Image (cartoon, helix red, strand yellow):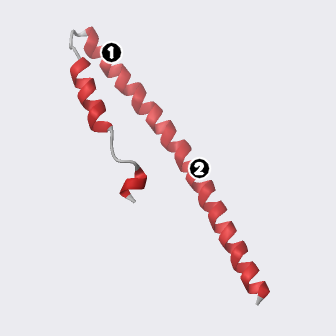
Amino acid sequence: MTDEKTQSKDEQIGFHKGALSTLGKEREELTRILSIVEHFIQMHSNALRELGVDLSQKEQSVEKKAKKKPIEDIL
């Protein structure tokens, strides 16, 4: 019985380590994607400013909408 309990614990440890490894890679990819999106936002914002468009009010409203509930509240 001790072997079964130890094996089960070892399997659980392996499962959680694997999950953390996968989630870490996913986070890295999301960070990379976010960086690309931010770059494009800056490019378009700069182009609009050069064309004389005032984005200050629009940027503030977008920032307010972007603030969402923390994941802990959702779960």
Residue type, mark 2 in image? Gly
Q: Residue 16 at what x, y percent from top left? A: 63, 64
Q: Residues within 10 Å of mark 1 (few under 14, many from 20)?
A: some
Three-letter residue code for mark 1: Asn
**Which image quarter is the C terminus in?**
bottom left
Residue 50: horizontal and vertical position, in percent? 27, 9
Q: Quadrant of the N terminus?
A: bottom right
Q: Secondary structure at mark 1?
A: helix
Q: Position of residue 21 (x, y in %)?
A: 63, 55
Between the C-alphas of marks 2 and 1, the distance is 33 Å
Instruction: Tell me: 42 left or right of 60.
Output: right
Of marks 2 and 1, which one's residue comes earlier in the chain? 2
Above or below, 66 against 51 in this view is below
Q: Position of residue 6 (x, y in %)?
A: 76, 79
Q: In the depicted view, which residue is nearer to us: 29 or 16?
A: 16
- Residue depicted at 36% across the width and 20% down the height: 43
15 vs 1: above or below: above
Describe residue 65's horizontal placement relative to residue 4 as left or right: left
Secondary structure of the residue carrying tag 2 is helix
Q: Quick one: which residue is furthest to the front in this view? A: 73
Callout in the foreground (2, 1): 2
Residue 54 drawn above or below residue 22: above
Which mark, residue 24?
Answer: 2
- Total marks in image: 2
Residue at image location 23% in from the left, 29% down from the top: 61
Q: Which mark is residue 46?
A: 1
Q: Residue at x 69, y 79 (%)?
A: 8
Task: Name the residue: 36% across, 56% down.
Answer: 74
